[in-house]
Image: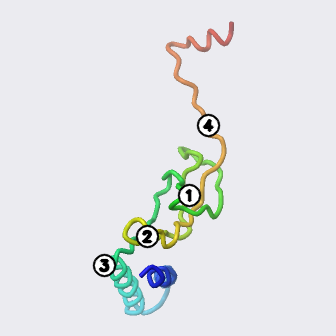
């Protein structure tokens, strides 16, 4: 079951890419609809046999057992170092525990900006000036 499931993961990627390239293009609507239905039926068939797609959200803690770092990204507002910046390719698991492919992600790196704690009525400013 694992080799078959693992071999179908790239097919899911290709169907996703096909649907993405057809959306917004000037192809007949029936062609786009057929591609979307094929992608959805493939995903549903895989799910019936225990294959689950893993799409970590931006900001999720990077987990090397589930994620493969493809690139690093500088910290942006509100981001924490060592968290997912974006997903290059989703990951897939079989029955929730067997990794078919780790999610390929970008990871935020850099120093977190520390905000000074708010001072009570400027006490910190007076102490700094002394």
Determine whether label 1 and label 4 are within 8 Å by CB: no
Secondary structure, mark 3, is helix
Q: Is residue 80 above or below residue 84?
A: above
Assign the N terminus to one quadrant of the image. bottom left
The answer to whether the residues at label 1 and label 3 have Cβ atoms under 8 Å apart is no
Q: Tell me where residue 35 appears, x and y as whole percent.
A: 41, 88
Dot 2 corresponds to which residue? 93
Q: Is residue 73 visible?
A: yes
In the structure shown, which secondary structural element does the residue marked by tag 4 occupy?
Answer: loop
Q: CA distance from mark 2 to mark 4?
A: 35 Å
In the picture, which quadrant includes the C terminus?
top right
As helix, strand or loop, the secondary structure at mark 2 comes to strand
3D distance between C-alphas at marks 2 and 3: 13 Å
Q: Earlier in the sequence, mark 3 or mark 4?
A: 3
Label 2: how many Cα within 10 Å (few below 14, some 14–19, many 20+): many
Residue 113 is marked as 4
Q: Which of pointers 2 and 4 lies earlier in the amino acid sequence?
A: 2
Find disc 3 in the rendering and name its residue.
Answer: 48
Residue displayed at 49% across by 79% down: 6
* Mark 1 and mark 3: Cα distance apart in space: 27 Å
Question: Is 102 left or right of 109, judged from the image as shown?
Answer: left
Q: Is residue 87 left or right of residue 73?
A: left
Q: Earlier in the sequence, mark 1 or mark 4?
A: 1
- Residue at 48 percent of width and 53 percent of height: 60
Instruction: Name the outermost residue toward the left.
Output: 48
The Cα–Cα distance between marks 2 and 1, rounded to whole angstroms, is 14 Å
Check contact, mark 2 vs mark 1: CB within 8 A. Answer: no
Numbered circle sitting on residue 64? 1
């Amino acid at each position: 079951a694992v080799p078959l499931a693992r071999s179908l993961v790239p097919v899911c990627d290709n169907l996703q890419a096909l649907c993405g390239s057809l959306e917004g293009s000037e192809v007949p609507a029936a062609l786009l609809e057929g591609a979307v239905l094929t992608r959805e039926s493939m995903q549903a068939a895989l799910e019936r046999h225990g294959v689950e797609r893993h799409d970590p959200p931006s900001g999720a803690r990077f987990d090397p057992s589930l994620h493969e770092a493809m690139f690093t990204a500088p910290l942006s507002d509100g981001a924490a170092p060592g968290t997912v910046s974006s997903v290059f390719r989703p990951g897939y698991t079989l029955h929730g525990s067997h990794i078919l492919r780790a999610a390929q992600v970008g990871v935020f790196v850099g120093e977190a900006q520390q905000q000074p704690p708010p001072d009570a009525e400027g006490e910190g400013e007076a102490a700094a000036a002394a």
